[in-house]
Amino acid sequence: MSLVPVSTAVRKRGMVAVVQRGDWRDEVAVEEPLEIRHAGRTLSVTMRTPGHDDELAAGFLFSEALVDQAPDVGLTDELEANTVEVRSPLARQPDPRAFTTTSACGVCGAGAIADVRQSAAPAPPGPEVPAALLADLPERMRQPTFARTGGLHAAALFDAEGGLLVVREDVGRHNAVDKVVGRRLLDGALPLHGLLLCVSGRLSFELVHKAVRAGAPVLVGVGAPSSLAVELADELGLTLGGFARRGRLNVYAHAERVGG
């Protein structure tokens, strides 16, 4: 087993940092803060992996019902470009205390569950997808930075036949989903009706919220769901599948979209 030296040099290169002392080196995922601002006011500060920050900001704003269409966002030169300025109007004025975020939790303490239910319409019916295809979705995700560092989550969007449409990586599951949703929003390709959303980790209620808010009828994860994720998925008509691995899948809500 290699022990990380007490004193190390860290050189950041995009999503990957090289940690080195002497002949010993390793690659780790980069984690840095991103501030999302509107009219000079901080909306959110989240810990994320740099890259696709415009998508992250757009997806976050849409998921939190702060915008209903693609926002005008851009990186500033402040804090080594770790700030995104939202230039377009917001759909509503948020309470800035609602968006205390980390790489592990997208909206920790962000208000009552009633607010989540209010901002997410029930998922549409269809499509019916073979269980074997859903179980195989994690294997179809391309995760090159995870392969190098072992330290990133991924979210991917597929069509009903399992064709990969978008994939993004980040230290936070919710950030990866926001990047996928943000990409589609910026492309004018929301809602995600008829498509399949897959994440590399566990399934929390906030991921269910983001999936339903974006119009995805199916959410699949490699890990386990929480009780609140199952309850919210069942209430909002989302097909929720967990433990998708080695050809198997547990379906926790709305199995009517899952074929034999």
Image (spheres, helix red, strand yellow):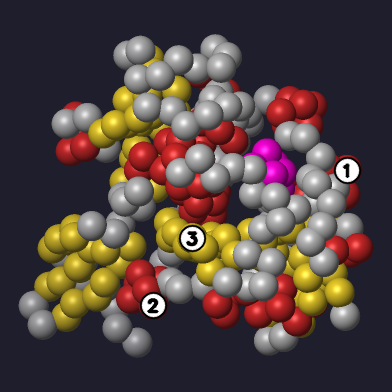
- Comes first in the chain, label 1 or label 3: 3
Residue in the picture at 66% in, 79% down: 136
In the depicted view, which residue is nearer to us: 142 or 27? Answer: 142
- Up/down of 248 relative to 41, above or below: below
Residue range highlighted in magenta? 206-215
In the depicted view, which residue is nearer to us: 228 or 141? Answer: 141
Residue 208 percent across, percent down from the top left = 71, 48
- Up/down of 85 relative to 218, above or below: above
Mark yes or no: residue 182 visible. no
Q: Report which quarter residue 259 is drawn in.
A: bottom right
Mark 3 highlights which residue?
166
- Up/down of 37 relative to 150, above or below: above
Q: Residues within 10 Å of mark 2 (few under 14, many from 20)?
A: few
* Cβ atoms at labels 1 and 3 below 8 Å apart: no
- Comes first in the chain, label 2 or label 3: 2
Q: In screen coordinates, is 247 left or right of 175?
A: right
- Comes first in the chain, label 2 or label 1: 2
Q: Which amino acid does the dot numbered 1 rest on?
A: Glu
Mark 2 highlights which residue?
147
Q: Which amino acid does the dot numbered 3 rest on?
A: Val
**Rendered-image quadrant of the C terminus:** bottom right
Q: Secondary structure at mark 1?
A: helix
Residue 46 percent across, percent down from the top left = 43, 38
Q: Residues within 10 Å of mark 1 (few under 14, many from 20)?
A: some
Residue in the picture at 57% in, 80% down: 139
Residue in the picture at 37% in, 74% down: 144
Mark 1 highlights which residue?
235
